[in-house]
Structures are given as C-alpha cells and as structure tokens.
Amino acid sequence: MIRRLLAQRSAALALAVVAGLVLVALAAPLITWIAGSSPTAFHGDAVDPALGGLPRGAAGGISTRHWLGVEPVNGRDVLARVLYGAQVSLLIAVLATALSVVLGTALGLVAGFFGGWVDTVVGRTMDLLLSFPSLIFMIALISAAPGVDRRLLLVVVLGFFGWPYVGRIVRGQAMVLARGEFVAAARVLGASRRALLLREVLPNLTGPVLVVATMSIPGYIATEAGLSFLGVGVQAPTPSWGQMIATAVPWYAADPAYFLIPGAFLFVTVLAFNVLGDAVRDALDPRSQRR
Amino acid sequence: MGRRRVGLALGAALGLLSAAGCAGGGGGAAVSDAAAVKGGTLHVLSTLDLEHLDPARNYVTSSQDVGRLIYRTLTTFAAAPGQAGGKIVPDLATDTGRPSDGAKTWTFTLKQGVKFEDGRPITSKDVKYGVERTFAPELPEGPPYARMWLAGGESYKGPYKDPAGLASIGTPDDSTIVFHLNRPVADFGSAVSLPMFAPVPQDKDTGVNYDSRPFSSGPYKIDSFEPKKQLTLVRNTDWDPATDTVRKGLPDKVVIDLGLDAAVVDQRLIAGQGEDADAVAMEPIGPASVGRVLNDPQLKSRLVTGDSINTRYLSINTRHQPLDDVRVRQAIAYALDKDALRTTRGGPIAGDLATSLLPPSLGYQAEDPYPSTDGKGDPDKAKALLAEAGHASGLTLTLDAPASTAGKAQAEAVQASLGRAGITVKINEISSSAFYSTVGNTSQEHDLVIAGWSPDWPGASTYLPIVFDGRLITSQGNNDYAQYDSPAVDAQLDRIAAMDDPSAARAAYGQLAQQIMQDAPVVPFLWDKAPILVGPNVAGAYGHIAYVGRLDLVSLGLRR
C-alpha cells in the first residue's frame, strides 16, 4: 500500500509536507532554542510603540533575530509561535481524530454487526448528533466551562461531535461484512461473537477507517483554528494558528506578513492532509484510482 | 461618569482602542473651525451602542456626549479643548448656582426664552420633574447624587409612585428652582451638569419608553432611533441659539451609525470618500491604524487628539490571599510593564503612562512611588519584595479580562510582565457585555481586574470616594474592584467631604491619593488620550475632557 501511495507524486509530496510539519512541531523547543526565541517572551524593542506597535524593519520585522518577524504590539517571535502553534493544532487534531475513530468504530461496528435495536439506538444517536448545530453547541459548551484545560476540552468536544461521521461508514461496511461468506464460515466453525467481531470484521475495516481518519485531521485543524478565531480556542498565552490569524485581521494593511505567515501554514497543512487522504483512499481502493 | 468606569466601552467591539495623544498632547491638536458653515448632514461612526438616552439613566460618557445635542441641563461643561473644557458654565440657568446655608441650599434661575421642541417654555417644574424621575426604581443605572444629597431622597420612590413630588426641590416660580440638600456640597453646581438635571415635561414622560424618544430641549430632536443601528437627529427649530453659549448647532442633521466594526470605521475614515468626508469617529483609532495615520501627513492632519481625566489601573483584590499582604501588592506595582500595556492600546498616542491616582489633567502633580525605567517595570525589585513576603518561589494569580481583542492583548501584557517577577497569571476571559457585572460581583471577582475611572466632573470628589471608600463595597455592582477597605482612608474621605473650601479639599484629596498609593490597592498605568479621525470636510473638531477625549459633538460643523 505504501508503495502504491508513494507512486503518486502529489501524495509523496503531501506526505513529505506532513512529515516535515510533524517533525518541526516536535522539534519546536530545539528550533526556538537555536533561533534564540520563545513563544511567550515580549520584545518591546522589536516594535515601534509610536506607530501603534508596528514591528520595526521590513516584512513584519523579519531579521536574523526573528526569522519570521514578530507580532505587532507585543513583539513575540512569530516563528516560535507558529511552531508551538503547530504542536497545539496537530496534537488537538490527532487526539480528536483518535477519539472519534475509537468511538465511531466501536459503535458503528456493534450497530452494523448486530443490527436490530442496537442499530436503531446507535443510528438515531448518530442522526441526532449529525443534525445538531455543532459549532454553536461547541462555542456554548466551551465558554460555559471555565477553568478546564481548553486543549482537553477541544479534543473531547471535537471528538464527540466527529464520531458519527466515522460511525456511519463503519456501520455500513460492518453490515456488508457481517453477511460475508468468511464470517458465515467462521460462525459455523464455532467462533464466538467476540471473535467474529474482532478477528473477522474489524481487520477488514482498517482501510475505510484509515481513509476517514486521514481526511478528518485537516477538518479538525481547521475547526480548531476556527474556534480559536472565535475566541473559544486554546487560552493565552498558548499559541495557536487560529488565534494568530484572528489577532492579525485588523493588521492586514499595516503588517501583511503577520497575517500571511500563519495563514500560509494553515493552508499548506490542510491542503497536504487532504491530498494525502485522497491518495490513501486511491491506494486502498484500486477501483477509484485515477488514470 | 458613570459607568464612568471606562475601558470596556472603548474595547468592546472587535476593537482595538486606544486613546491618545501625540507628543504635543492636549488641545493644541484641534482642527481650525474657521471654515465651518451652517447646514449639511454630519455623520458619526460609532462602534458602540447608545445604552441609555433617557436623561435619568444616561451615565455612560459616549451617550452623554450625544445627549448634550438633545437636552440641556442647568449647567454644563464649556465647549473647549483641553482643561478649559472642564470648566462648568451656565446652560439653562443664568449662573452656576447660588449656594446658601453653608452650601446646603442651592438656587438656580432659568434663562428667559428657553423652549422645548414643541415651542412651550421650559419651566423650573420641568427640571424638578426630571430630577424626581431619577428616583424611580423603574429607571435605574443613573448617577447616585440626587438620592445621596437631596433631603428626603433616601425614602422618595419617584413621581410614578409618589405624584406629590419631592419637597426638597422648591419651585417658587416658573424660572426659579431651589435644591435643599442634607449636607453641604461645595460642587453641587458641577453636579447639575449631569443629564439627570435635564428638564422633562410630565405629559411627555413615557416611563421606560422615554429612553427611545427623550423630548428635546437642545438644538436637535430625535427623528428616528433604532438601537444598535442608527440614531437620526434633526434640527429643533424652537431652540434659540441666543440662549445657548455652548452648542453651535451647525449641521441640519446628525446621523449616528451604531455598532460598526472598529476596523471598518478606521478604514472608512482613512479613505474619507463620499459621505465619509462629512463623518467623524466616535471612538479612538485602533493600534493597527496608528502607523498608517501617523506616516501620512494628510491623515495626520485629520487626527484630533483629546485629553481626558481618565485613569486606567490594574485593581488588586486586597481581600484575597496573598494579596492582603501590602508587599505582594507593591511587588505587582513594581513588576507591571506599563509601557507594554500602553502599546496594546496604540502606544504613546494612547496617552501618558500613569504613575499615581490623580491625573495631571485634574491639576495634580504626578508622583511615582513605584518607579522603573521608562515605565517598563522593575522585576528585580518585585522579586525582592515577594521574597521578603515569603513568596520567593513565585505565586499564581487569576486576572479577569473582557474577551475582546483589546482585552486579551492587555491581559497578555499583564501576564508577560508579571511573569518576569515569578508571578504566574491565569487569564479568565469574560464576555465583554457581562464584564462589569461579573467583576462587580464580589464573589465572582478574581485576583486582578483591569479597570479605570473617569470622574463625573473635574476633581477628585467623584473618584476617590467612590472607588476607595470601603463602606461602599457591595456584593453586586461594586466599583471598588480592589475591595480596598481602610478605616483610615474612610475617615479622611469623610473629613474632606465636610470641607466647604474647594481648594483645601483639592489639596487634601491629593495627599489622600498619595496615602492610598502606599497601600497599592491599584496600579495606575495610563492617563488616556483619544486620537480620533475626522473626515476632511468636518470643522470644529476637538476632544473633550469630560467625554474621555471624544469629540465634542456640539461644536462640529461642515466646511461646505
């Protein structure tokens, strides 16, 4: 599968971008140590208070000291904030995906395999969650829970509203697989229901689950950025891309670099994950392969 | 005034505020009004809503600025830039009041020829009725002074429940009004400049609904009002300019757009095209626009910088551990980077770094009991004080901040600067609309609050007694966010309130402010100035000291 994936040039590139991103996010402390910056330290000397806190120097204050410039007003290092922001964004997206995949797979599997009232209960719950105005609910929930670690809250909320998307696909697949001949054969040989579920059906779901997971990561990154933009994301001074973009909006004319840098990172990341997700699907399902 | 707590007002919208003066500061920045002519439509672009236009309830500086276009009061502020604007001048009355009985009785005589918008003359009974309305529990949120000072005021329930009226306001004839007070009040002549002393004709009083259509006694009457959207004022033809030395009443029409996005207002005024050439901003420009405006001589010439009597400070909750230890509070006073806080509001253009409680615009000297280089804070000194207090390993505090862009930027500046001294600050974001009601609730308030205060009229008498009198701490609607309760200070406040010599009281307030600063219940960081953009066709613009440096709307006119 990996070979088939890498055969697509766009997929190889996307994978490289994602891998690079994960690497720099993990290495954020090392990189900022080399660059001699910190994501939270104010640098009053790097901005000009007389001009409303505009960074000194060209392109948002890009210099040897601040490789991607500084934030207006407080002079925090943009590189350090983008890297630590990547850590936060990726961590939340990956954990939320893990949560929604675990929940969605477990419930979807049970519903699809057993059918009957179990299917009805799980199915209606998924319908309910899918028809919910989840963004509004997330904003209300997060602002109503002060004092809780926002990162944890975001993971839980995003994962909770995300599992039905996984669950629906898993349920459909599980339904088909449950009627498969190999399952019937195993049943005749006396396999327990638990063995049927875990040994026969679940392994055959790996492909679709992997595709949904890859495709949902960019969605969560974008949602996390959106929630941070709306002021209910991670709390200051923890950096996040959405927050950076939100504070950069009024500065688009005075300091365009500040707006463009986190925006470009968000764009490239979401694009790379989407391309990768498409490629994973193509690699797993030869019928959908582009010619 | 009022909610002359400030702060939020400016920052409420997406907004960035700032206030500010440029280097020259002061009234010198006023644009010449030589070319102003009568007529035209003036536009005002505001990021805020007008909370209350009912004179009984109008206690927010921006609404008071607008209210001055619609109703007249017994006295009012002079229409002038800088400290001259703080002077109280006669408005409906012929003078600023005649005290007798040791300043316990105040008599005012109304001018001849003053009229309401339907042409009927304004009488002393209309003024009396307007003041009586402010006692009605149905009309809350106004200033407390009538209730505090008028004899029998504590038990009077307003004209709706008690149509007989308040006996301590006498109207011997149609043009004379006499106030009998329960204590000497040396500056009662200043107090009657508040909107609550505007005349209200009894037959036009619509109770709670009066808020949307107050009856006009000034140069403009309300044509239409859609809260949070637009207020349209048209000329009141029965207003006689000969009776009014303050208001110019130049434009035929004033249109105030409400609830706009701060960045949009800046953008529109920077462009200054079409209708926006005849427009002014209600609020100061945001930090993101400061660089653009100052770098462009054309735009800079359209920037008006108003002085204010506002002081912004960080309140320290003295009832919380370990902030009850004065050394910890002093450590915070040393650690705070005032310059970084000012930069979040736009830099030096947003005002001068505050070092003491009473601003120089009130005529006081600025001492600095907690000095640091360029106001950037002294973390070493702070650490030493913390170690002395037994907190060498640091401590953790929670700051209440409004969840606006500006609120967050300020909160992060506090967080970063106290962090240098080993104080970890957690930020508790509160939605802007609920901010003051939350921090004014003593059980919900945390350790630190960024607040500010603008006296109701120049002087310390509506500032120190309201913000630092421990006996006025209430469980809800509290203004003393430091919850500072010092019997010694309370005794001083009583002593000063009883003085009938204004200059002695002034000096005593100055000494008391120094005494309070030793206890460090608050850390003043900014004396605001307001840099406001004015359309190229607008003349007569200057910032007014009584409205936190916002433009004095009554003097604006169009050049053509």
Image (cartoon, coloured by chain):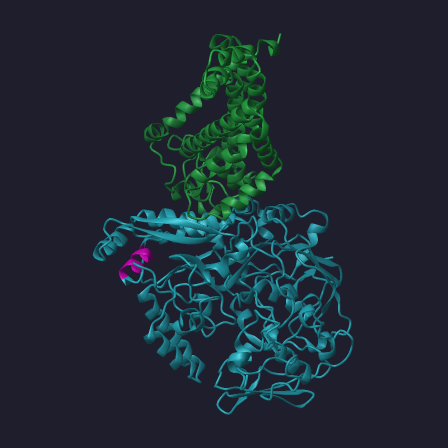
| Chain B display color | cyan
Q: Magenta part mainly helix, strand or loop?
A: helix
- Residue A60, image x, y percentages: 48, 35
Nearer the observer, B256 or A126 = A126
Which residue is more in the foreground, A37 or B321?
B321
Total labels drawn: 0
Location of residue A166 (image quadrant): top right
Say which quarter of the image contains residue B105. bottom right
Q: Which chain is green?
A: A
Identify the residue at image location x=75%, y=59%.
Answer: B40
Lateral position of residue A129 relative to residue A73, left or right: right
Residue A91: % across, % down: 43, 31
Residue B332 in magenta?
yes
Q: Residue at x 42, y 71 (%)?
A: B464
Q: Which residues are magenta?
A: B327-334
Where residue B123 appears, as percent x and y from the top left, is 70, 83
In magenta stretch: residue B471: no
Is residue A271 visible in the rendered image? The answer is no
Q: Quadrant of the C terminus of chain B?
A: bottom right
Q: Nearer the viewer, residue A93 or B352?
A: A93
> Residue at 55% across / 69% down in the picture?
B85
Whether residue B138 is visible here, answered yes or no, is yes
Q: Is residue B146 left or right of residue B557?
A: left
Percent of width and height locating residue B94: 63, 83
